[in-house]
Amino acid sequence: MIEMPEDFLKKMRLLLKDEFADFLKSYQENRSQGLRINTLKVSVEEFLKKNPFHLEQIPWIREGFYYDEEDRPGKHPYHEAGLYYIQEPSAMAAGIFLDPQPEEKVLDLCAAPGGKTTHLAMLMEGKGLLVANEIYPARAKVLSQNVERMGVRNAVVTSESSGRLAGRFPAFFDRILVDAPCSGEGMFRKDPDARNEWSLENVAVCAARQNMILQDAAVMLKPGGRLVYSTCTFSPEENEGVISEFLQKEPHFEIEDVYMHEGFGRGREEWAGTPADGIGKTIRIWPHEVRGEGHYIAVLRKKDGEEPRKGKPVKALKDQKLLKDYFQFAKENLTTTPHGTFIVFGEQLYIIPEEMVSFEKLKVLRPGWHLGTLKKNRFEPSHALALSLRKGDALHTVNLDSNSPEIIAYLKGETIETSGKKGWHLVEVDGYSLGWGKLSGQILKNHFPKGLRWTGI
């Protein structure tokens, strides 16, 4: 069994009483690992026909599956193609309870590394505006990379404080996810750092920060909108306590009574100090009751408040001459030319999501769908464009078998011998987009990004 902080064990023994023995026993077992099929790129049925792993359905999510440790899906070409996201099974529940709809404006406020963001994008079917925010720049970069890998077209990635965003977007979003930074008790089986950094003092620090973030989120939600608060900790101070304190300050919010999946528990009124009405409708996921780690989820509805704001419009690119080389590339290489509202970030060309408003003076890593680079007298397509293309979108392709030595060579950054028309080719793995190559003679020059290339294989 893993070693856990003594103060944590004392606390859980007092809270759980007769349940504590079963709770502790769960830490003698191997943790369950999961992947979520990315339906932006492949249907569940289609993936299962090609499935190279030992998969078992996760009960609470149609697209989620447990896998065996020996499967190593992170080392398979399908991972680089964005056909799935490796995600802890309990963490997949938050997106289900937020239940974002196509065409809505949705905010994932504490979004890195991107598991929940890419789940929301999938549920939105690539339609509407999805803002994924992460305050720490290094983590925001990882978030942006995962948005790219999963072929998400309608996401804006920012790196801002919740307060800065609240000042710009009052009553703007239809749905907000606050997957709050927490003491990480639910990750003790998975993450040694979470165990080593835990303390009773840190729990209190986290609870204060969570209250602040929730207050900012409340400002940004439209009347009638849904806010989901989630943590990966057992601590009542960060869960029932935070929600009860929030509802005392924000009476125009209420806890929604949502469908409970088998094995999920309810929030504990007796742990909340002064419990808010309906705190027993919140959700607890326990490692001794389901095959997953610890999670807490509260689903809140904003009953009334300030009327929705439209926001300042984006300054779109008006000089169509700048797009000449892009349109020429699309004509020569794509079956359909992507259109929309274009903007240029330096030399980088993007199509911004519908409902996008001005993010001027905010730290934006990715303002939408990255198409490529406008260079002098030519357009160079981005890796993001490659990964967002579906079957039949590219005129020229090189399709490699997932078990072939050629696919490994491509992922390592090597050239490939092949035949075809000179110029850009979309490299595919078993028919799914993976990256670009440029053919000259019978040699395909590799354009898979250097920072993503496989090593040591």
Image: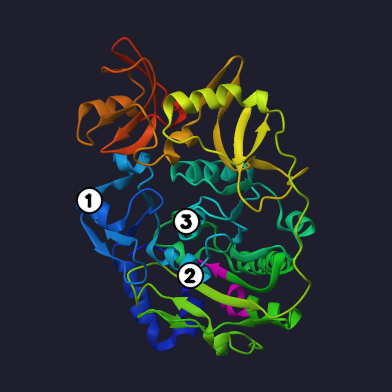
Q: CA distance from mark 2 to mark 3?
A: 46 Å
Tell me which amino acid carries mark 2.
Glu
Would residue 289 be found to the left or right of residue 239 on screen? left
Q: Measuring from the top left, give residue 82's x and y in whole percent.
A: 38, 44
Q: Which residue is mark 2?
A: 6
Residue at 46 percent across and 68 percent down: it is 96
Q: CA distance from mark 1 to mark 3?
A: 23 Å
**Is disc 3 surrounded by few (<14), some (14 to 19) or many (20+) residues within 10 Å?**
some
Q: Which residue is mark 1?
A: 51
- From where the camera sits, is residue 5 visible? no
Q: How many marks?
A: 3
Residue at 61 percent across and 84 percent down: it is 272
Q: Which residues are magenta?
A: 229-241
Q: Measuring from the top left, give residue 63's x and y in whole percent.
A: 34, 61
Q: Which residue is mark 3?
A: 125
- From where the camera sits, is residue 404 visible? yes
Query: Which SS class for mark 3?
Result: loop
Magenta stretch contains residue 232: yes
Tell me which amino acid carries mark 3.
Glu
